[in-house]
Amino acid sequence: MWPDLIRKAKDGGLDAIETYIFWNAHEPQRHQNEMQIFITKIVNMCKEANLFAPQGGPIILAQIENEYGNIMGPYKEAGNLNQPKWGHLKQLHEAIKLGEKILTSGNVTTKQFGNGVNLTTYSNTTSGERFCFLSNTNTSQDANVDLQQDGKYFVPAWSVSILHGCNKEVYNTAKVNTETTVMVKKPIELGTKLSWMWAQETIRDTLHGKGRFNATKLIEQKEATSDESDYLWYMTSIENMGKSSHNATLYVKSSGQVLHAYVNSKHIGSQFGYDFEFKQPAILRPGKNFLTLLSATVGLQNYGEFFDLGPEGLAGGPVELNVDGMASLNLSSNIWNYKVGLNGEAKRLYDPNSPHAHIWKTSKKLPIGKPMKWYKTSFKIPPGTSPVVVDLQGMGKGHAWVNGNSLGRYWPSQIADTNGCSDTCDYRGEYKPEKCVTNCGNPSQRWYHVPRSFLNDGTNTLILFEEMGGNPSHVSFQTVVAAAV
């Protein structure tokens, strides 16, 4: 996958590619391969291999952090050329390279024509070489500019023209002459319908309060999991000294992102979001009552000031029980038992070579719409070289693997806001998050790229863990090809 993507980037005029080195994966627990040690090791390895530019290598810049802004979202699905964007940027790179020397060594002057029109000139007084940028920052009015002996130019609103020699337009940001393409998904003929096996995620141990360690407080989630799993179980018990059942209301303050609550093995509700308050009725039976809370993340904060201090899970709570006719019980300082991850994760059910293959079941009627289910199917590699995607329509929320390789988390049941989209897009003016919004009323992601490097020539295995309840019978494989508009 990567050699092809890098080749396309180079063909598009890019001379440098930034890559991440994720130090956090090398320090799963504090003070075990600390960040400074890791960074020093990486830098020394690069030096030893003569990879930095002063040594004749390809690395021109290395930095610790660069995440200072938001990232634009889905560009649709899968390694193909995104036209006209790819071709338009290729022309931009070619135009910039025409003035490569003068741009890095020339003198700069700017002339203002008024109404947002400016001419920025790079010049070399010795050689007489010139290179110009003619810009129009007006958000609504196009401009006709007369540069006398250097010619007349039409500059659309909110655009920039590049003038080679300051007398020949070689590029304009708003004048797109590259053919537009759309990504077309073609169903893959697998010969037969996907045949599914399934396995139940066993949670009997946690529903009865059995954990791996305990504390008299509500622990921050990533502190407990060390990012080994999205899931952390919080478990405690409450004594009902009376002889009859009591109606109660469970209140939980969560820092996110998903919470599933069980009282005496019964699922009483789920909720998701950031910094939300969960409130659901429950029944306390006489004697010991078990409270089990499963907190799930969909990723950890990875940028912003003090992001590492941002809490996840039930950190600090509170967790309270409001019992009818009695005072509210604050359970935050109870003895809490904890367990990291799922039993299926521990058994590596996502790996086709897991020794627990006997767990998988086949049945004429596939259990669907039920939470905490594992699903498995086999498929053949599709012919050709086009990118492959799996359509997870019908699934709820969970995680997908192909041949033991993670495709990522999925959540197609989470639908984007139906408001804010338009059939037209006006690029002019400053960027705003609500500008040119697409995909309203649809899942944020439905198709997941399956790199061909993950696939075997023979039989391949897709495994899904479904957390909330879905129907895998709608899942299908497709190839993505670029088609001209």
Image (cartoon, grey):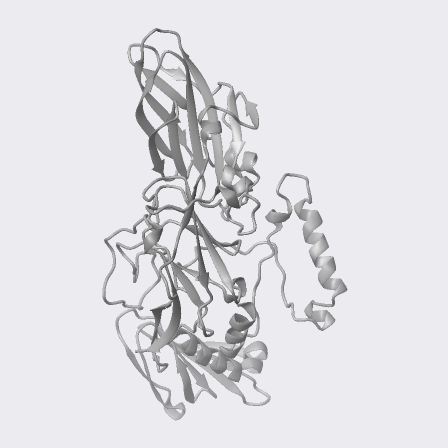
User: Is any atom of residue 306 visible in this view?
Assistant: no
Residue at image x 64%, y 44%?
Answer: 27
Q: On the rendered image, what quadrant is the C terminus found in?
A: bottom left
In the rendered image, the residue lying farthest to the right is: 48
User: Is any atom of residue 383 visible in this view?
Assistant: yes
Rendered position, 476 above or below 343: below
Tell whether 233 sits left or right of 480: right
| Image location of residue 24, percent across then percent down | 60, 47
Residue in front for this viewpoint, 434 or 50: 50
Rendered position, 241 above or below 458: above
User: Residue 207's image quarter?
Assistant: top left
In the rendered image, the residue lying farthest to the bottom is: 149
Tell whether 299 sits left or right of 48: left
Tell whether 65 sits left or right of 244: right
Residue in front for this viewpoint, 110 or 141: 141
Numbered circles on residues, count:
0
| Image location of residue 214, percent across then percent down | 55, 24
| Image location of residue 50, percent across then percent down | 74, 68
Rendered position, 465 above or below 440: above
Residue at image x 71%, y 48%?
Answer: 37
Residue at image x 64%, y 48%?
Answer: 26
Residue in front for this viewpoint, 446 or 381: 381
| Image location of residue 268, percent across then percent down | 33, 28
Residue at image x 37%, y 62%?
Answer: 192
User: Residue 258's image quarter?
Assistant: top left
